[in-house]
Amino acid sequence: MEYRTLGKSGLKVSRLCLGTLTMGPLQAHLSLEDGERVIRAALDEGINFIETAALYDTYHYIQRGIAGRSHEVVIASRSYDYTYEGMKNSVATALRELKRDYIDIFMLHEQESRLTLKGHAEALAYLADAKEQGLIRAVGVSTHVVEVVDACAEHPLIDVVQPIVNYAGLGIKGGTLEDMLLAMRRARAQGIGVYAMKPLGGGNLLPNFSTAWKFILSLDCLDSIAVGMKTPAEVKANVKIAAGKPIPAELEAAIRADKKKLHIADWCLGCGRCQAKCAEGALYFAGGKMHVDPKRCLLCGYCAAVCPEFCIKVV
Ligand code: SF4
Ligand code: SF4
């Protein structure tokens, strides 16, 4: 496993970062034991970077998976909080549930514009105080939007940015793939640590996964690449792929075929909360219930988290 320094945060992270959304209740909803197995397999393969979010509800998996090896691991978490107190509570919850004295990187989740970043000034002020107190080690932002990456590069409090990037440009907002790559390079030149989300387009690029990996591994402006995983076999395969090594043909075929989709149950009430949450415009209302356009859906599962009727699942 190759390790790189995540910009001015100084954190040494593996080239591959274990994304935990896939194992949690918004997606595969693994048992605690199975989630623990995935995390331990990742650590055994040399992955030392794990990402989560308040929304994902996966702290309990991580806490079990890193027990006894917590000192080896860099954890990034995120929250949508925009107030000082809200962010303080989110960091406190992460510390308590992960049973740690500090979180390596705490991030503003999914920033949509320069303005929303400004609107999160209080939350950022708390993260700066938490860093001063040693409760977190770095402040970060995750985003799909080109101008937010640029805003992060100019922001004195931000150490790490996590943009969406993949060869097809899926999910990138406010510019093209080229624009995003330029913004990432500008951020890196300012000392910001940059790590990618959704290199496989939330599963949409799995049929072309060799192209997707070749592209993401070729980028000189990335320190690490976050990929959601949910089985020890998947961990092993991804570690090999990220190291540029071949994987068995049957495993490659299984990965290509592992296409997920969003399922919306018939008991949907049409309340529209999921649609308001989807930044991709992938949900539409017809015939009394919500439907998904699979071409736009990135399978992030964020809509599922707000459905009061538990109608939405990634299957
Ligand atoms: S939030 Fe749930 S109940 Fe409301 S429209 Fe979406 S799927 Fe239907
Ligand atoms: S429909 Fe749901 S899972 Fe798909 S992109 Fe929108 S919020 Fe994410």
Image (cartoon, rainbow, N blue to C red):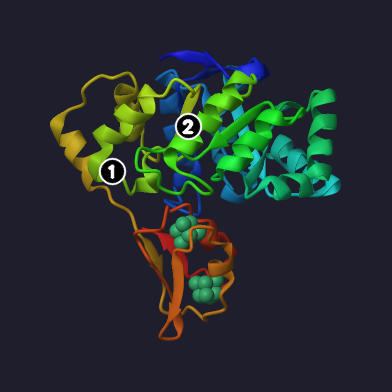
Determine if residue 199 is in view.
yes
Name the quarter where the N terminus is drawn.
Answer: top left
Residue at 33% of width from left, 30% of height from top? 215
In the image, which is nearer the foreground, mark 1 or mark 2?
2
In the rendered structure, the answer to whether residue 14 lies left or right of residue 153 reads: left
Q: Residue furthest bottom?
A: 287
Position in image of residue 289 (x %, y %): 45, 80
Q: Which residue is mark 1?
A: 206
Q: Splitting the image into 4 quarters, where does residue 45 fall?
A: top left
Q: Residues within 10 Å of mark 2 (few under 14, many from 20)?
A: some
Looking at the picture, which amino acid does disc 1 mark? Leu
| Separation of marks 1 and 2 at Cα, in angstroms | 22 Å
Residue at the far left in the pictured view: 249
**x, y (%) of residue 200?**
36, 41
Image quarter hosting the C terminus: bottom left
Q: Nearer the viewer, residue 208 or 132?
A: 208
Q: Nearer the viewer, residue 113 or 53?
A: 113
Residue in the picture at 57% in, 48% down: 56
Judge by depth and name the residue closer to the eye, 7 or 254: 7
- Neighbourhood count class around disc 1 (C-alpha, 10 Å): few under 14, some 14–19, many 20 upward: many
Is residue 98 in view from this perspective? no
Q: What is the x, y in percent for residue 268?
A: 48, 78
Which residue bears the numbered disc 2? Answer: 181
Task: Determine the residue positioned at 58% across, 67% down.
Answer: 276
Q: Identify the secondary structure beneath mark 1.
A: helix
Q: Is residue 79 above or below residue 77?
A: below
Disc 2 is placed on an element classified as helix
Q: Toward which corner of the image does residue 217 lie, by quadrant?
A: top left
Q: Are marks 1 and 2 in contact (CB under 8 Å)?
A: no
Label 2 sits on what residue type?
A: Leu
Q: Which mark is first along the chain, 2 or 1?
A: 2
